[in-house]
Image: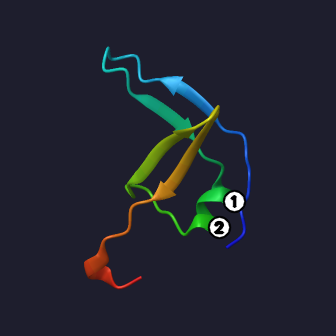
Amino acid sequence: MSVTYRTAVCHDAGDGSSDLIVEIPPEVLEAMGLRLGDKLNLELVGKDLVLTPIRDSSQGS
């Protein structure tokens, strides 16, 4: 598995929830096989925020 690093812009959702809105460029979405509405796991590793898709095991990726 190869590891790719990208920089993305994060914005406060502005609704008091402490949620973030992460702007993911279209080419990254395509490379990760993501579509609008897909869920991501976010993990803080050192100073990096690591995004990984949450796959539904019943769909048989």
- Residue plotted at (43% across, 56% down): 36
User: What colouring method underlies this structural image?
Assistant: rainbow
Q: Amino acid at mark 1?
A: Glu
Q: Nearer the viewer, residue 25 or 32?
A: 32
Local SS, label 1: helix
Q: Which residue matches tag 1?
A: 27
- Residue plotted at (73% across, 58% down): 4
Q: Which residue matches tag 2?
A: 31
- Residue plotted at (38% across, 68% down): 55
Query: In the rendered image of this protein, does residue 45 appear above or below residue 33?
Result: above
Q: Amino acid at mark 2?
A: Ala
Quarter placement of the C terminus: bottom left
Residue ranking furthest to the left: 58
Q: Viewed as shown, does residue 26 lie left or right of 35?
A: right
Query: In the rendered image of this protein, does residue 29 appear above or below residue 13?
Result: below
Residue ranking furthest to the bottom: 60
Query: Alpha-carbon neighbours of circle 1 within 10 Å: few (<14), some, or many (≥20)?
Result: few
